Amino acid sequence: MPIKTTIDDRLLARAQRIGGFKTRQATLEQALREFVDRRRRLEMLAAFGTFDFEPGFNHKVLRGRPT
């Protein structure tokens, strides 16, 4: 999907060089993937400690498997 936007040419060139990408598009796609991955990890970290842990819980019982 074509998108028209203004991006700092020096920043993009630096990212392309550091990442070893052949095209600007590949550089931008990887940057977006890494951004999304990082945000998802931060969301998971924020959720850490918000779930109750039950020490005696046995997930195999719910599946009907013998313990």
Image (cartoon, helix red, strand yellow):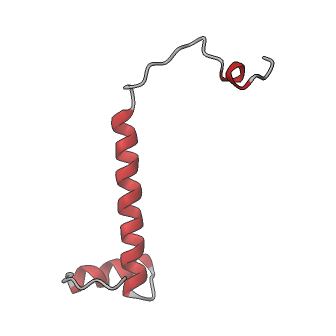
Along the line of sight, which residue is nearer the eye, 38 or 19?
38
Q: Residue furthest top?
A: 56
Would residue 3 be found to the left or right of residue 50 on screen? Answer: left
How many marks the image carries: the answer is: 0
Tell me where residue 7 sits by quadrant.
Answer: bottom left
Front-most of residues 16 and 47:
47
Please state the horizontal and vertical placement of residue 55, each as a whole percent of the image. 56, 13
Above or below, comparing residue 27 to residue 48 in the picture = below
Q: Residue at x 65, y 23 (%)?
A: 59
The residue nearer to you, when weighing 10 against 50, is 50
Instruction: Please state the horizontal and vertical placement of residue 62, each as a whole percent of the image.
Output: 67, 22
x, y percent for residue 26: 43, 81
Q: Position of residue 50 (x, y in %)?
A: 37, 26
Quadrant where the C terminus sits is top right
In the rendered structure, the answer to whether residue 46 lies left or right of residue 26 reads left
Question: Which image quarter is the N terminus in?
Answer: bottom left
* Residue found at x 24% / y 85%: 4
Residue pictured at 36% horizontal, 77% vertical:
28
Q: Residue at x 35, y 43 (%)?
A: 43
